[in-house]
Image (cartoon, rainbow, N blue to C red):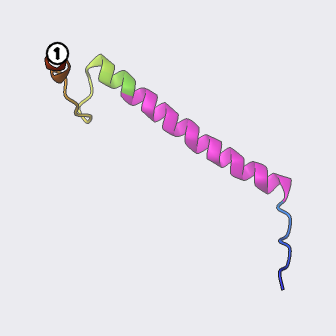
Amino acid sequence: MAVPKKKTSKSKRDSRKAVWKRKAAVEAQKALSLGKSVLSGRSNSFVYPQDDEDEDEE
């Protein structure tokens, strides 16, 4: 027979949500940092084609 689950406390719920948001904020900061380093030309760890855009337009 099915039994209802126990209710999760508000503090546990809020704690989980805070962890999720903190992880998302860290990943967003990493993405922004990578984008800035790629645009500045100082990136050594991120490889992408640079000259292909000029050839595609012709």
Where the C terminus falls, by quadrant?
top left
Q: Main secondary structure of the magenta part?
A: helix
Residue 9: percent from left, percent from top: 85, 58
Dot 1 alpha-carbon crowd within 10 angstroms: few under 14, some 14 to 19, many 20 or more: few
Image x and y of residue 30, in percent: 45, 34
Q: Secondary structure at mark 1?
A: helix
Q: Position of residue 44 (x, y in %)?
A: 23, 31
**Identity of the residue drawn at 85% across and 69% down:** 6
Residue 41 vertical placement versus 5 (above, below): above
Q: Is residue 8 left or right of residue 23?
A: right
Q: Quadrant of residue 46?
A: top left
In screen coordinates, is 37 left or right of 23? left
Residue ID at (20%, 19%): 53
Please state the extent of the stretch shown in magenta in the rendering: 9-34
- The residue nearer to you, when weighing 41 against 7, is 7
Residue plotted at (70% across, 52% down)? 16
Q: Which residue is mark 1?
A: 54
Instruction: Check if residue 30 falls in the magenta segment.
Output: yes
User: Residue 52 in the image: x percent, y percent?
Assistant: 16, 23
Q: How many marks?
A: 1
Tell me the kind of residue under disc 1: Asp
Specify whether residue 2 is painted magenta.
Answer: no
At horizontal 17% and vertical 15% (from top left) the residue drawn is: 54
Say which of 48 and 41 sits in front.
Answer: 48
